[in-house]
Amino acid sequence: MDVGDRQPGPATLTEAALSHGLGIVAARDPDLADILERWGPPPLWDRPPGFPTLVHIILEQQVSLASAQAAFTRLCDAVTPLTPEGFLTLDDQTLKAIGFSRQKTAYGRYLATVLVEGQLDLVVLEHMDDAAVRSELMKLKGIGRWTADMYLLMVLCRPDIWPSGDLALAIAVQEAKGLDRRPSVDELDAMSTMWQPWRAVATRLFWHAYLSTRRQRTI
């Protein structure tokens, strides 16, 4: 292994950095190399920063991506453009019809309120390190480790984020590694050290295998 492979990665994962990181993690891990060979490179899966994306991630908590996307589309149809101020004009009945549970309604309103009142500036997060971003987001009601990690991974595109609490990731690792059972969060964290500082690249490869395998089964 080249010593340079263990040097810190770029500040942001771009398409070029993703391509470079894929070569590194595939060289370290034959299972990831197999995924890359079978399915090709994964998408960057980047999302724009701001309130709409954070609300979308909240909608994705503990539901399917398709269900969350449908609710988010209805939300954007109801409030155009989707702003914190606009979100706060929606009543409980409207949000329920869109697809918000009572709990997620409370989370969305709280997030919108702190942004309107200036208690949180999402732009500032772009200049913080990973731990500081995670800490700042997790101060908010309804935002735990998984939601903060999704924002770091897909919005800020940090290269070394490993969302060990993600169910799809755990299943994908189990399948790729041929494990008898789904690895725990602690086991996933321990396993992830081999891909540092490119764990976000490994995450995208595992997700790519997870989605591609299920898409193939559907076809």
Image: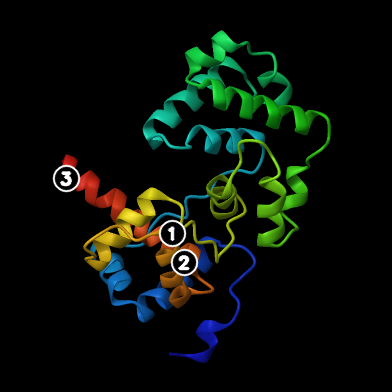
Instruction: Say few, some or many: other residues with alpha carbon within 10 Å of mark 3 (under 14 / 14 to 19 / 20 or more).
Output: few
Image spot of residue 177 (x, y percent) = 26, 67
Mark 2: amino acid? Asp
Contact flag, marks 1 and 2 (Cβ < 8 Å)? yes
Residue at the image point whose x is 50% and y is 22% from the top: 101
- Distance between the Cα atoms at labels 1 and 3? 27 Å
In which image quadrant can residue 55 be found? top right
Q: What element carries label 1?
A: helix
Instruction: Say few, some or many: other residues with alpha carbon within 10 Å of mark 1 (under 14 / 14 to 19 / 20 or more).
Output: some
Q: Which of marks 3 and 2 is nearer the N terminus?
A: 2
- Distance between the Cα atoms at labels 3 and 2? 29 Å
- Distance between the Cα atoms at labels 1 and 2? 6 Å
Image spot of residue 62 (x, y percent) = 43, 37
Image spot of residue 69 (x, y percent) = 44, 31
Per the image, the residue denoted by label 2 is 189
Q: Is 43 situated above or below 201?
A: above
Residue at the image point whose x is 68% and y is 46% from the top: 137
Mark 3 or mark 2: which is in front?
2
Image spot of residue 82 (x, y percent) = 64, 25
Per the image, the residue denoted by label 3 is 217
> Front-most of 174 and 112?
174
Residue at the image point whose x is 69% and y is 39% from the top: 140
Mark 3: amino acid? Arg
Residue 39 seen by the camera? no
Instruction: Please indicate whether residue 164 sits to the left or right of residue 153 in the image.
Output: left
> Residue 185's mark?
1
Instruction: Give the residue furthest to the right.
Output: 118
Residue at the image point whose x is 54% and y is 73% from the top: 197
Mark 1: amino acid? Val
Instruction: Please indicate whether residue 203 sits to the left or right of residue 135 in the image.
Output: left
Q: Is mark 2 on a helix, strand or loop?
A: helix
